[in-house]
Image: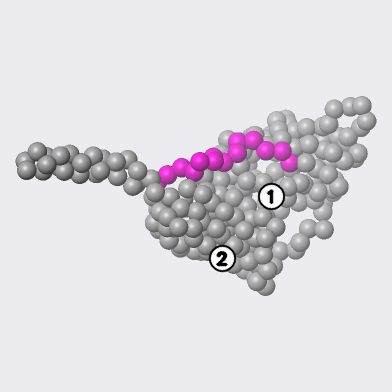
C-alpha cells in the first residue's frame, strides 16, 4: 500500500509540474467585429487587444511593409506594423508624389526626416522609393500621411506595441489567435474617429469568443 501511495504521490507531483508548464499558457481565439455609427461593418479599423495575462501570439507583428502610391491613393490605406519596422513607399504613378508623415514618430531616409519626393515611374527606370523607420508606437500620420502635390491622398500607419493588433477586413472583422485566457480589453483606432473611445472589456476563453464594438463615426468609403 505504501508503494502505491508513493506512486500516486509522484503522479500528482508530475501532473502539477505539467500544469505549471502548460496551464498558464492556455490561450483562445478572439474575433472582433467593428461596426460604424450606422451599424455597417467598418473596414480598415485598427483593433488593439490588451490581455490581462502575459503571452505571445504565434505570429508576431510585421517589421517591414510596403505602401504603394498608385492611382493617387496610398495602398493599403492603413498599415499595421510593430515598433522598429521599416516601411517602404513606392510611386507607381507616372507623375511625382510626396510622402509626408504628420508626426515625429517616423524618421525618414530623406534629409528633412519628415518627407520625401518620389519621382513618377518612367519606363526603363527603377521605381522611386523612400524608406521610413517606425520607432514610436501609435498612429503615424493618420490623415496627415499624404502628398503635398495631391491633397486628396491620405492614409495611415499604426505602430503597435501590443502584439495583438490588427486591422479589420472588408467585413469589419479582425481575428486574434493565442490570446491569453482571462480578462482583456479591446481598443479601436480609426483615422475618422477623432475622439478616443473607452476600451471595451472582454473575457477570453479556451473556446472561440466573439465581440462586437462600434465606432462613433461613419467613415467615408474609399472610391
Q: Quadrant of residue 182?
A: bottom left
Q: Quadrant of the N terminus?
A: top left
Q: Quadrant of the C terminus?
A: bottom right
Which residue is the extreme one toward the right?
Answer: 123
Nearest the camera: 165 or 150? 165
Query: Which label was assigned to residue 213?
Result: 2
The stretch drawn in magenta includes residue 162 = no
Q: Earlier in the sequence, mark 1 or mark 2?
A: 1
Residue 193 appears in view: yes
Residue appearing at x 54%, y 41% in the figure: 59
Q: Which residues are magenta?
A: 54-67
Mark 1 surroundings: few (<14), some (14-19) or many (≥20) residues within 10 A: many
Q: Quadrant of residue 65?
A: top right
The stretch drawn in magenta includes residue 66 = yes
Left or right of 3 on screen, residue 181 = right
Left or right of 190 on screen, residue 95 = right
Left or right of 162 on screen, residue 122 = right
Q: Which residue is mark 1?
A: 78
Gap in angstroms between the C-alphas marked 1 and 2: 19 Å
Most frequent secondary structure within the magenta stretch? loop
Helix, strand, or loop for circle 1? strand
What is the x, y in percent for residue 46? 61, 54
Nearest the camera: 140 or 22? 22
Residue appearing at x 32%, y 40% in the figure: 21
Residue appearing at x 51%, y 49% in the figure: 177
Which residue is the extreme one toward the left?
Answer: 2
What is the x, y in percent for residue 118? 82, 35
Mark 2 surroundings: few (<14), some (14-19) or many (≥20) residues within 10 A: some
Residue 113 appears in view: no
Amino acid at each position: 500500500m505504501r508503494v502505491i501511495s508513493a506512486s500516486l504521490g509522484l503522479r500528482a507531483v508530475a501532473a502539477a509540474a505539467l500544469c505549471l508548464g502548460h496551464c498558464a499558457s492556455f490561450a483562445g481565439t478572439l474575433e472582433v467585429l467593428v461596426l460604424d455609427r450606422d451599424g455597417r461593418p467598418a473596414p480598415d479599423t485598427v483593433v488593439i487587444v490588451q490581455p490581462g495575462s502575459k503571452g505571445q501570439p504565434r505570429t508576431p507583428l510585421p517589421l517591414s511593409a510596403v505602401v504603394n502610391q498608385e492611382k493617387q491613393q496610398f495602398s493599403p490605406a492603413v498599415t499595421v506594423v510593430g515598433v522598429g519596422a521599416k516601411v517602404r513607399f513606392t510611386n507607381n504613378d507616372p507623375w511625382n508624389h510626396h510622402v509626408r508623415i504628420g508626426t515625429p514618430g517616423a524618421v525618414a531616409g530623406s534629409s528633412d526626416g519628415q518627407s520625401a519626393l518620389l519621382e513618377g515611374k518612367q519606363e526603363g527606370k527603377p521605381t522611386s522609393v523612400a524608406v521610413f523607420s517606425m520607432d514610436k508606437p501609435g498612429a503615424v500620420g493618420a490623415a496627415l500621411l499624404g502628398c503635398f502635390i495631391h491633397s486628396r491622398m491620405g492614409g495611415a500607419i499604426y505602430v503597435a506595441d501590443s502584439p495583438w493588433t490588427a486591422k479589420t477586413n472588408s467585413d469589419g472583422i479582425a481575428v486574434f489567435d493565442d490570446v491569453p485566457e482571462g480578462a482583456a480589453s479591446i481598443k479601436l483606432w480609426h483615422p475618422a474617429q477623432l475622439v478616443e473611445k473607452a476600451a471595451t472589456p472582454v473575457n477570453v476563453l479556451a473556446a472561440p469568443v466573439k465581440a462586437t464594438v462600434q465606432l462613433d463615426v461613419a467613415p467615408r468609403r474609399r472610391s
